[in-house]
Image (spheres, rainbow, N blue to C red):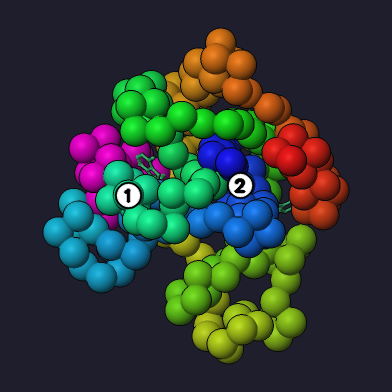
Amino acid sequence: MHRIVFLGPPGAGKGTQAAALARELGIPHLSTGDLLRGAVAARTPLGLAADDHMRAGRLVPDDLVLRILEERLARPDAKAGFLLDGFPRNLAQADALGRVTPLDAVVSFDVDSEEIVRRLSARRVCPQCQSVYNLSSRPPQAAGRCDKDGASLIQRSDDRPEAVATRLAVYAEQTAPLLQFYRDRGLLRPVDARGNPDDVARRVRTLVR
Ligand code: AP5
């Protein structure tokens, strides 16, 4: 069974790697960031409550995130495994997750903050299909357009420099303690997430097979 968590700072490449690995393993890729952005776009009560926190780069309150995550984990496709991307993000969430399901591996992505800032400032996303590009490492075929549906690419509001600085501080303060939490439980599998995405993908696969 593959019950995997991807842990790491913003822009470390978790989403890029998670999408491909989940497809290969036939398990759902559960990104709380994507679920929350979907709720914001649909203007649901949860999305409206989450929006300001996300724009500023702060964590969304635990009760809101736990609600969407538990609903999503309860769906039938998550019964045979899942890849959690961006959850848990603090000790309270890790405790809550532990009450819902055991885990098989926690892959932690190691990248320095200069590289993170470089990656996030160059990230562009498709507002229609959510495909993720990078002006340096993964440019679209036609400048500014999504390869899949031709929509105009945008920059995420939390990829502005002020929000990135907040996200890095929040990671250091609230999420980084989870490294020790999972090391203590024998689940932590660190991966060097620098260098080209295909090399990172190969390293990740040696840790979860
Ligand atoms: P979320 O969407 O989870 O953002 P994040 O964790 O900050 O992660 P990112 O999506 O920014 O980065 P990533 O590691 O997935 O990198 P990517 O693959 O895109 O969360 C957003 C917000 O939602 C949070 O700030 C918070 O407000 C809220 N939230 C979410 N979960 C929550 C929770 N559990 N509790 C409370 N609040 C929560 O790669 C980045 C860029 O680099 C891309 O352009 C990509 O193409 C490029 N790239 C990827 N790999 C490489 C490589 N190896 N070399 C060069 N470029 C690369």
Label disc, if present, on residue 74 of the rendered structure: 1
73 in relation to 28, above or below: above
Relative to 190, residue 46 above or below:
below
On the rendered image, what quadrant is the N terminus found in?
Answer: top right
Give the CA separation, mark 2 to mark 1.
23 Å
The mark lying in front, picked from 2 and 1, is: 1
Mark 1: amino acid: Ala
- Which quadrant holds residue 187? top right
Please name the residue shown 59% across and 42% down the image: 2
Mark 2 close to ligand 1, CB under 8 Å: yes
The answer to whether 37 appears left or right of 67 in the picture is right
Nearer-N-terminus badge (2/1):
2
Find numbered disc 2 in the image and state the secondary structure of the residue it sits on. helix
**Which residue, given by chain and number where applicable, does mark 2 sit on?**
14
Quarter holding the C terminus is: top right
Question: Is 144 positioned to the left or the right of 129 in the image?
Answer: right
Does any portion of residue 114 appear in the rendered image?
no
Q: Are marks 2 and 1 in contact (CB under 8 Å)?
A: no
For the residue marked with disc 2, what is the amino acid? Answer: Lys
* Residue at the far left in the pictured view: 45
Nearer to us in this view, 97 or 40: 97
Q: Determine whether the residue tagged by mark 1 lies in a helix, strand or loop.
A: loop
Magenta stretch? 50-67
Magenta stretch prevailing secondary structure: helix
Instruction: Name the residue: 76% across, 61% down.
Output: 137
Q: Residues within 10 Å of mark 2 (few under 14, many from 20)?
A: many
Q: Is residue 168 magenta?
A: no
Residue 72's spot in the image, x, y percent?
34, 53
Q: Nearer the viewer, residue 206 or 170?
A: 206
* Residue that protrudes farthest toward the top in the picture: 184
Which residue is rendered at x = 50% and y = 70% of the image? 130
**Residue 74 coordinates in the image, percent (x, y):** 32, 49
